[in-house]
Structure formats: structure tokens, C-alpha cells
Image (spheres, grey):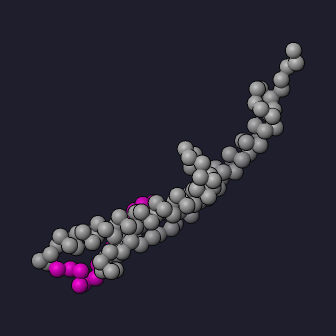
Amino acid sequence: MAKRSGGGFPGGMGNMQNLMKQAQRMQRQAEEAQAELEEAEVTGKAGGGAVEITVSGKKEITKVKISEEAVDPDDVETLEDLVMAAANEALREIEKLSQEKMGSITGGIPGMPF
């Protein structure tokens, strides 16, 4: 019986080496994309722009802007709702940006660690 080379990998060691190189390239691309994402900022708006919240790629709020007309001491609840809506919109946008960047690297392969 002939002995198989390549440690049992289909196509031998050459394919395994190519897979390793491809994985390393994807890892570098993911690290570069992550660095770009950390520099990115998105802004969520609510109440027609009365409340704006900016979130970084690190998912940290970096800026809150509230227009004077949104501030009504007799209706704090509406302002709270606007702040929450703007924050949630900004977080959804940064998550969408993150998925787009990482998805372009992994080709949409589910379960990739990047």
C-alpha cells in the first residue's frame, strides 16, 4: 500500500500551506480594518436632529449635542427618549459599519473569529 504524503490533508501540504498563508493574510486585513474602525465615528440623530449622539468605532459615546428647543423642563421624558433613540441609532450604524468592513474580509463566512 502506498504511503500518502501531506499528513492526510487533501491535496498534500501545499494546500495546507496556502490555507495558512490565506488565514494570515485575512488576520492582517482584519487587524487593519479594526484599526480603521476604531478611528471611525458615526452620528445618530433623533427628533429631526434635535438630539445628536456621536459614537466611535470603539462603541464609546464621544459627543452629545442637544438643541435648546429639545430642552423642556416640564417634559424631561421626551428628551430622555430622544437621547436614547439617537444613541441606539448611532450604535446600530457603527455595528453596521463594523459588519461591512469585517464581512468584506471574511467573505461573509459565519463563525470567523475576526
Q: From which residue to which does the magenta span run?
A: 58-72
Q: Is residue 62 visible?
A: no
Q: Name the spot of residue 103 as percent of width and height, x first.
A: 58, 56
Q: Name the spot of residue 95 as percent of width and height, x first.
A: 46, 60
> Which residue is painted at 23% across and 84% down in the image?
69
| In the image: residue 107, left or right of residue 45 | right
> Which residue is painted at 34% across and 70% down in the image?
86
Relative to 85, is 6 above or below? Answer: above
| In the image: residue 19, left or right of residue 41 | right
> Which residue is painted at 38% across and 67% down in the image?
89
Q: Is residue 44 visible?
A: yes
Relative to 3, is 20 above or below? Answer: below
Relative to 7, is 36 above or below? Answer: below
Q: Name the spot of residue 73 as percent of width and height, x first.
A: 14, 78
> Which residue is painted at 75% across and 37% down in the image?
16
Residue furthest to the bottom: 69
| In the image: residue 55, left or right of residue 111 | left
Q: Name the spot of residue 83 as percent of width and height, x first.
A: 28, 70
